[in-house]
Image (cartoon, rainbow, N blue to C red):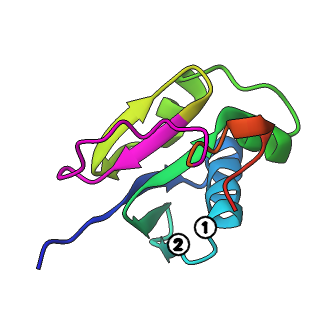
Amino acid sequence: MADFSVGPVLLHEPVGEAVLQAIAAADPQAELIDRGAYVRVLTKGRCGVSRAAIEARLGREVLWPGDLEAVMPSWKGRLRITRDEVWWLPWAEKADPQSAQDSPAAEGKERQ
């Protein structure tokens, strides 16, 4: 059976912690594997987080996508960064991750 888990590897830095918190809030079933210097985040299927959710947790604006790239040395799956959000997608997925229903940036709030 294929493994469709995806997600980022995040450094223990303020922006990395904000991304981690935003993903965990949007997907409470996300697997968080702490390796000391970094945390591997794995979700089943898609993993998405909005820039607004990251900024809300950080308490300031982020330089997008530079601040994210600086704390994400690796990831699993296909990466898609838009102006307002970031997605990690399974390689097998063909659909565009952006839809009003699935987008973590929809209506300025996270996915529930």
Q: Is residue 30 left or right of residue 110?
A: left
User: Which residue lies at the image location 50% right of the left edge and 24% below the top edge?
Assistant: 82
Q: Which residues are magenta?
A: 86-101
Q: Label 1 neighbourhood size at 10 Å, few (<14), some (14-19), many (20+)?
A: some
Circle number at residue 30: 2
Looking at the image, is 12 positioned above or below residue 63? below
Q: How many numbered marks, from 0 up?
A: 2
The overriding secondary structure of the stretch rendered in magenta is: loop
Q: Secondary structure at mark 2?
A: loop
Q: Is residue 77 left or right of residue 48?
A: left
User: Which residue lies at the image location 72% right of the left edge and 42% below the top edge?
Assistant: 54
Q: Label 2 neighbourhood size at 10 Å, few (<14), some (14-19), many (20+)?
A: some
Residue 53 lies within the magenta run: no
Q: Position of residue 92 (x, y in %)?
A: 17, 53
Q: Cα distance, mark 1 to mark 2?
A: 6 Å
Q: Position of residue 27 (x, y in %)?
A: 60, 67
- In the rendered structure, which amino acid carries the disc numbered 1? Asp
Q: Residues at badges 1 and 2 in contact (C-beta under 8 Å)? A: yes
Which residue has dot 1 on it? 27
Looking at the image, is 31 positioned above or below residue 96? below
The residue lying toward the viewer, choosing from 53 and 75, is: 53
The residue lying toward the viewer, choosing from 51 and 36, is: 51
- In the rendered structure, which amino acid carries the disc numbered 2? Ala
Image quadrant where residue 43 sits: bottom left
Looking at the image, is 78 positioned above or below residue 34? above
Q: Position of residue 95 (x, y in %)?
A: 30, 41
Q: Position of residue 47 (x, y in %)?
A: 47, 55
The quadrant of the image that shows the C terminus is: bottom right
